[in-house]
Image (cartoon, rainbow, N blue to C red):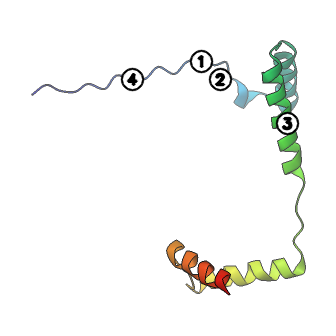
Amino acid sequence: MKESVTKPIKIPNLGYQNINIMSVSELKLEIINKVTSISDEKILEDIIRLINQESAMDQTYKLTEEERDAVQMGLEDVADGNLHSSESAKNMLEEWLKK
């Protein structure tokens, strides 16, 4: 019987090996340097879209008192073992929507 030999996969060095030791300021400068060298409009549009998504995610949603109470009730249900399977929840929702 022939032994199967697993060959290691060579992962290309994409230039990210030093990211973990860079400060935030150094990372920002590195990003600025990389972006200024890009001439492909599609890539630049993708970058700005990504930055805009990150900015939108920075905005914290504030729960209302009612929403906090609902979340608390849900957490208590979980702690008490009051759970439903996905299939059961789907069936319950379908029945509720029929009303």
Q: Which residue is label 1 attached to?
A: 13
Q: Which residue is label 3 attached to?
A: 51
Q: Which residue is label 2 attached to?
A: 17
Image quarter hosting the C terminus: bottom right
Q: Which residue is at the front of the view, 84 or 26?
A: 84
User: Which numbered disc, 2 or 4, marks the residue that appears first in the sequence?
Assistant: 4
CA separation in Å, label 4 and label 1:
15 Å
Position of residue 31 measured from the top left corner of the image (x, y, whole percent): 83, 23
User: Which numbered disc, 4 or 1, marks the residue that appears first in the sequence?
Assistant: 4
User: Which numbered disc, 4 or 3, marks the residue that appears first in the sequence?
Assistant: 4
Position of residue 13 measured from the top left corner of the image (x, y, whole percent): 59, 18
Q: Residue placed at 85% from the left, 16% from the top?
A: 33
Q: Residue placed at 63% from the left, 19% from the top?
A: 14
Please name which of the two marks, 3 or 2, marks the residue nearer to the observer.
3
Q: Which residue is label 4 attached to?
A: 8
Image quarter hosting the N terminus: top left
User: Which numbered disc, 3 or 1, marks the residue that appears first in the sequence?
Assistant: 1
CA separation in Å, label 2 and label 1:
8 Å
Q: Is residue 16 left or right of residue 87?
A: right
Please name which of the two marks, 2 or 1, marks the residue nearer to the observer.
1
Please name which of the two marks, 2 or 4, marks the residue nearer to the observer.
4
